[in-house]
Image: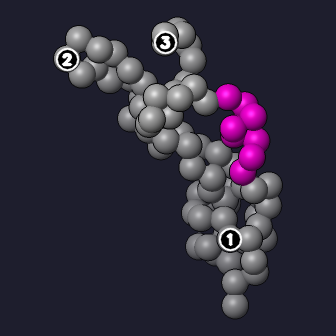
Amino acid sequence: MVRRGAVYDSDGFEVTEADVAEGPESGWCSECKEECEAKVIDNGIGVYEYGSERAVDVRLDTVSDCCEAEVLKEEPE
C-alpha cells in the first residue's frame, strides 16, 4: 500500500528519517578538499506515471554542504 505524502526509494521501500540520519555527519569534500559537514539531498526525478500507476522516484545522496560533492571519510592527500 502506498501512503500519500510518503517518500519511497527506487526499490519501493518507504524512506524514514532514521534512514537519512545514518549518513556521515562530517568529513572532507572531494571537490575543494576542505573539511565539511554532510547533508542529504534528493536527486530523484520526483512524481512520475508509468502506465496507470503513479509513483515517486527518490534517490537520496549524501553530499558536502560546500560543493555538493562526495564526502570523504579520510583527509585527502
Q: Quadrant of residue 48?
A: top left
Q: Secondary structure at mark 3?
A: loop
The percent position of residue 69, horizontal first and vertical second, equals: 58, 63
- How far apart are the alpha carbons under marks 2 and 3? 17 Å
User: Which numbered circle lies on residue 46?
Assistant: none
The residue sitting at 63% across, 52% down in the picture is 62
- CA distance separating discs 1 and 2: 40 Å
Q: Report which residue position mark 1 lands on.
A: 72
Secondary structure that dominates the magenta span: helix
Region rendered in magenta:
16-23
Image-based side of 20 in relation to 57, left or right: right
Q: Which mark is residue 2?
A: 3
For this view, does 11 lie left or right of residue 3?
A: left
**Which element is circle 2 on?**
loop
Q: Earlier in the sequence, mark 3 or mark 1?
A: 3
Q: Quadrant of the C terminus?
A: bottom right
Give the colour scheme shown.
one colour
On the image, the x and y values in percent for residue 31 come to 59, 73
Callout 1 environment at 10 Å: few (<14), some (14 to 19), or many (20+)?
Answer: many
Q: Which label sits on residue 51?
A: 2
